[in-house]
Amino acid sequence: MRVLVAGIIARYPFGGVAWCSLMYLLGLRALGHDVMYVEDTGECIYDPERDAISEDPSYGTRHIQRTLEPYGFGDRWSFVNFDGTHHGLSREGLRRHCADAELFVNLSGGSWFWRDEYERIPRRVFVDSDPVFTQLAIAKGEPWYVDFFRRFDRLFTFGANIGTPACDVPTGTFAWEKTWQPVVTDLWRTDGVPQGDRFTTLMTWKTESFTDVDGNKDREFVRFLRLPESKPGRFRLGVNGPMDLLRDHGWDPVDAMAASRTTDDYREFIQASKAEFGVAKHAYVAHRSGWFSDRTECYLAAGRPAVVQETGWSAHLPSGAGLLPFSTPEEAIDAIDRVEADYATHARAAAAIAREHFEASHVLASLIARACD
């Protein structure tokens, strides 16, 4: 099958975001499909070298090339700039691929356009990596936004409880199906030992998207701000937040952008960690969305246990060994103590969970079967 995958590698040019799209491309190719990447958001990209949103897409297009070329996709991508110019594969090359494509996978709004070449693809699916925010935005009833989602054959979400009685987020006439981020576990497996005993994570303190929803990670994190008092010297955050505040409370913050500039940087940060300690966005927690992090999946695939905040995900995934939920500071400390008491067992369990639940071949085979049903 010929597949077109739309993603946001250039729009948010950092390692974690790049891995999300890359593992769709790799997983689909491993299943025997002919895959191409497109990015067509209509937005200007963020340029880390200028620390600014830029009309010049050159940093973003270089980032796409650096990300995809080592894996054989160096000539299999097209970036459509906000002004309509194409970079990488030409407009004609993109149209040729679309002409014979059978499946269009729009990941996280990698395209906000229904160009003729996309709309003619027989099967079209959207993958929602930001549940709650997406559904609340649709519920506002903005005509172009509602119409955009109506043109998909299937809607998938990382929020496992979206559209179920466990979650109070309105879905209206839209049906959302659960999926996970696919992970090519062989690319994360490591024989290396953790570099120290730090529980780490990479996180965005607060985003500027959906500003009308008070649902960012900062609101949850302050509930756990004093955790290092019980576990001094055990945490490191790759974060773009209030560094002095976090440092004063013992979190050992480092610049998230530097720690995750490339896919290799991002993977090395995770593999060097002993385990993850992760807090979720307030909206995910408050609405019991069942959201589960693609980043946490990568920790697990690397054989690094994860202690992560409960959003309702534990109803859908194993918990207790290798992957431990918490809702309060006391539960977080208990989970960390359990990991430290038998680290080898938790590390093995982490890797096993990744293989069983997130392996790209399984996740994507299921998505394709439902998309083409």
Image (cartoon, rainbow, N blue to C red):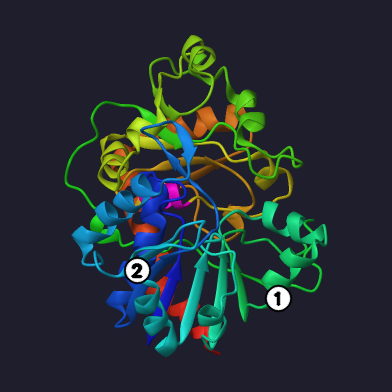
Q: Quadrant of the N terminus?
A: bottom left
Q: With 233 as the anchor, is 151 left or right in this view?
A: right
Which residue sits furthest top? 248
- Disc tally is 2
Q: With 46 as the anchor, is 194 left or right in this view?
A: left
Q: With 329 as the anchor, is 201 left or right in this view?
A: left
295 drawn magenta: yes
User: What's the magenta bit mostly, secondary-structure-wise?
Assistant: helix
Q: Position of residue 238 (x, y in %)?
A: 41, 30
Question: Image quadrant of residue 111?
Answer: bottom right
| Residue 25's disc number | 2
Question: Image quadrant of residue 51?
Answer: top left
The residue beneath circle 1 is 150
262 shown above or below 162: above
Q: Which residue is nearer to you in this view: 243 or 252?
A: 243
Sequence-first tag of 1 and 2: 2
Asked if the residue under mark 2 is in contact with the one under mark 1, i.e. CB atoms within 8 Å, the reply is no
Q: Position of residue 268 (x, y in %)?
A: 26, 40
Q: Amino acid at mark 2?
A: Leu
